[in-house]
Amino acid sequence: MATQRIIDFFKTRHSEGPCLVVDLDIIRENYLGFEKALPQSRIFYAVKANPALEILRVLASLGSCFDTASVAEIKMALEAGATPDRISYGNTIKKERDIARAHALGITLYAVDCLEEVEKIACAAPSARVFCRVLTDGIGAEWPLSRKFGCMPKIAVDVLHHANRLGLEAYGVSFHVGSQQTDPTAWDRALADAATVFKNMAKKGINLKMVNMGGGFPTRYLKDVPTAQAYGMEIFGALSRHFGNRIPETIIEPGRGMVGNAGVIRTEVVLVSRKSDNNNDNIRWVYLDIGKFNGLAETMDEAIRYPIVTPHDGSAVGPCVLAGPTCDSADVMYEKTPYQLPVLLSVGDELFILGTGAYTTTYASVAFNGFEPLRSYVI
Ligand SMILES: *Cc1c(COP(=O)(O)O)cnc(C)c1O
């Protein structure tokens, strides 16, 4: 969404390479929207989506908690004003010495998905609360996440039981239905699995307390997506179906859905060319000063398709391959499905890439080919 504030900000600044502007008003709206859609759930913002200090500060002041993946992210959340009881260490892959550092910082809530990780936590963060991540199928997500994280529900019971034996608090179950999850019913299958783990733990005399329902809430790119309210209703329905009148404490971890639509990137056309006069291969190539290595990594496999605003909108469009500025042939954003852009597009035109508040600044390389990481402003 290019808000008036973002448009005004860009007007005051001359081009200095690609840059991202994030509007805090949109993030506030998103936070309040999640609160309204899922009033019973605590919100743990997934810091990795955009860790800008100003964003973390605003969210902390609104009462948000934080899902972190490293000691550095824990420190950022603390610096932004969150207390340790509002921070979870949600990465299932941690060095034991990092767990010890998190423990020293006061963190008491940790993710696990196997026995080995439970052992590390028992040593480095005694009596911590742990939740076990279960696998999901990722169907309906444009950026699936599971596979690498989580275990089968049956294993989760062993993992949590082991945690209990080692003096940790077996606290709950987590899952992530896949990022940019456009199907609100995707939570139903995962909540069914979570309820199974709760039942099987209860049979062992251990009562779990919490379900961490992860992120996955989408942001609008080229297509409309259901509202936060629609997700809230589906999720509440699924919780009731699978937990009856004993709905546990729940948390959600929105990343993309919290910050995605708050950001706009300004970029510049560097070159427009064709490679052949042969009719089969004369597609137009448009090269921007931003690509996969300085902010648009999520175009990998053409997974995320961003809306692009040009100075010629409304005039005739034609297909093009959209590519970045580096000397790496992987630095092509859209080719398998060419992007439709105005035929009038020319060198020096400024474009605005919308929906870029999430997973852009942190996915940028440091200086590949001498291109700077993505500059970012929060207003
Ligand atoms: C990345 C991540 C999130 C955020 O996911 P979105 O799809 O951006 O909402 C939430 N939880 C965990 C554990 C994550 O790794």
Image: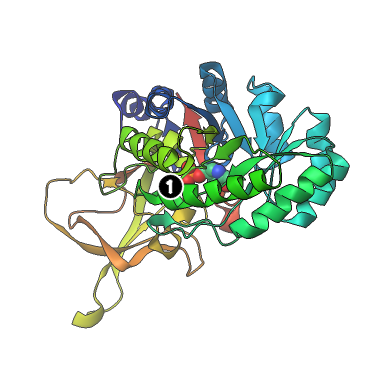
How many marks the image carries: the answer is 1
Give the residue number, with chain letter if any, for mark 1.
187
Which image quarter is the C terminus in? top left
Which residue: 34% across, 49% down? 182
In the depicted view, which residue is nearer to us: 71 or 345? 71
In the depicted view, which residue is nearer to us: 371 or 308? 308
Which image quarter is the N terminus in? top left
Q: Quadrant of residue 261?
A: top left
Residue 332 place in picture, x, y as percent: 41, 64
Which residue: 34% across, 50% down? 183
- Left or right, 126 with respect to 321, comes to right
Residue 293 place in picture, x, y as percent: 52, 55
- Left or right, 315 with respect to 62, comes to left
Residue 250 can be seen in this image = yes
Residue 278 can be seen in this image = no
In the rendered image, the residue lying farthest to the top is: 61
33 in relation to 112, above or below: above
Q: Quadrant of residue 309?
A: top left
Residue 12 place in picture, x, y as percent: 37, 25
Which residue: 79% across, 56% down? 116
The amino acid type, in three-letter code, at marker 1 is: Trp
114 in relation to 274, above or below: above
In the depicted view, which residue is nearer to us: 42 or 13? 42
Q: Quadrant of residue 123?
A: top right
Mark 1, Cα crowd under 10 Å, few <14 / some 14-19 / many 20+, is many
- Left or right, 48 with respect to 111, comes to left
Which residue: 34% across, 68% down? 335
